Each structure stands twice: as C-alpha cells, then as structure tokens.
C-alpha cells in the first residue's frame, strides 16, 4: 500500500481502509454497485475506535431515490451522528468508479460539514473507498491498494 506523505490519515486507519478495499473487491464482481455510506468512529489521534456504523443509505434504498440530494444527505448524517457515542468520526463512502474526486464526493463533503456543524461535532475526514484504493476528499489525496494474490509454491 502506498500512502501519500501528505495524507493526514493515521497508519491504523489507512490499514483499515485497505481492508475495506479488499472486502469491496471480494464482495463486488461488477464495475457498478450501490453506494454505501457509514461512520467510522475515531479516537483523538485519528485511529479507528470500534466497528463501523450501519449503512446510512439503507433507509433510502427502498424509497426509489437513486441519488440523495443535499438535504437528505444532511438528514441521514445527522441521524447517524445522533446515534454515535463517539465525538470524533470519519465518514466513509464506498462507491463505484475511480479514485478521483467527483461531484458526488464533493456533495457528501458539503453535507458532512453541514451535519457536523449542526450537531456541533468535530468535522472528521471524508474517505471514499473504490475497488482500486481510497481517496481522502478534503486533502485531495488518493492511495492505490495493491491486489492480494495467492502465492504459488515452487515445486
């Protein structure tokens, strides 16, 4: 895993994100799949503290809404922040596509900042996980996670 030297993400969180990338590769065989958004609790040093939260978009999945707008994103994030006992959280969004910032990522970033402001919480990082790696949206840094290969034993 190649971590950008300017990325403020802790090595432990970077390792957890690499695990999310490997999990995504195993779980999805298609190039297009539904977006998943969840909170990852962090401690004061930015290290993961506990397991990830539930998918925020499960409430939207059955409603026929394909892409949530800003108000719905903020409402979902406020609901999740209200349930979170940890004062510091990272928002992790799993989506299809490449590890480059796109308008959807920026929309999640705006909603995340608004929700943290309303809830009077610290604005944590927004991290986007894709099949090739992950992206730190506020700092515009991306990390490519190498594929795991089964090593063949020499005969």
Image: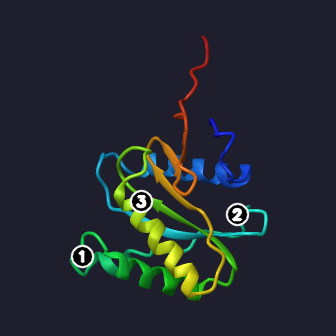
Precedes in sequence: disc 1 or disc 3: 1
For this view, does 42 lie left or right of residue 104?
right
Q: What's the mark number on residue 65?
A: 1
Label 1 close to label 2 by CB (< 8 Å): no
Near mark 1 (Cα within 10 A), the count class, few <14, some 14-19 or many ≥20, is few
Instruction: Name which quarter of the figure residue 150 lies in.
Output: top right
Q: What's the mark number on residue 105?
A: 3
Query: Which circle, 3 or 2, is nearer the viewer?
Result: 3
Cα distance in 3D space between marks 1 and 2: 31 Å
Query: Residue at image x 55%, y 57%?
Result: 138
In the rendered image, the vertical position of residue 49 relative to residue 14, given as above or below: below
In the structure shown, which secondary structural element does the residue marked by tag 3 occupy? helix
Query: Residue at image x 69%, y 79%?
Result: 86
In the structure shown, which secondary structural element does the residue marked by tag 1 occupy? loop
Residue receiving disc 2: 48
Q: Residue 90 location in percent, x, y?
A: 60, 67
Query: Residue at image x 62%, y 72%?
Result: 123
Cα distance in 3D space between marks 3 and 2: 21 Å
Q: Residue 17 location in percent, x, y?
A: 59, 52
- The foreground one among 28 and 136 is 136
In the rendered image, the vertical position of residue 25 relative to residue 138, given as above or below: above
Precedes in sequence: disc 1 or disc 2: 2
For this view, does 110 lie left or right of residue 45?
left
């Amino acid at each position: 895993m190649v971590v950008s030297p300017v990325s403020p993400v802790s090595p432990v969180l970077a390792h957890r994100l690499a695990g999310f990338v490997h999990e995504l590769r195993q779980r999805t065989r298609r190039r297009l799949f539904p977006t998943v958004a969840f909170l990852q609790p962090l401690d004061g040093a930015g290290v993961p503290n506990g397991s990830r939260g539930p998918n925020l978009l499960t409430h939207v999945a059955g409603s026929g809404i394909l892409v949530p707008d800003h108000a719905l994103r903020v409402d979902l994030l406020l609901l999740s922040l209200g349930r979170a006992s940890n004062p510091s959280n990272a928002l992790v969004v799993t989506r299809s596509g490449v590890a480059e910032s796109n308008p959807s990522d920026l929309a999640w970033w705006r909603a995340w900042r608004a929700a943290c402001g309303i809830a009077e919480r610290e604005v944590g990082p927004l991290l986007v996980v894709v099949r090739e790696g992950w992206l730190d949206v506020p700092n515009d840094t991306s990390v490519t996670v190498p594929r795991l290969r089964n090593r063949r034993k020499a005969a």
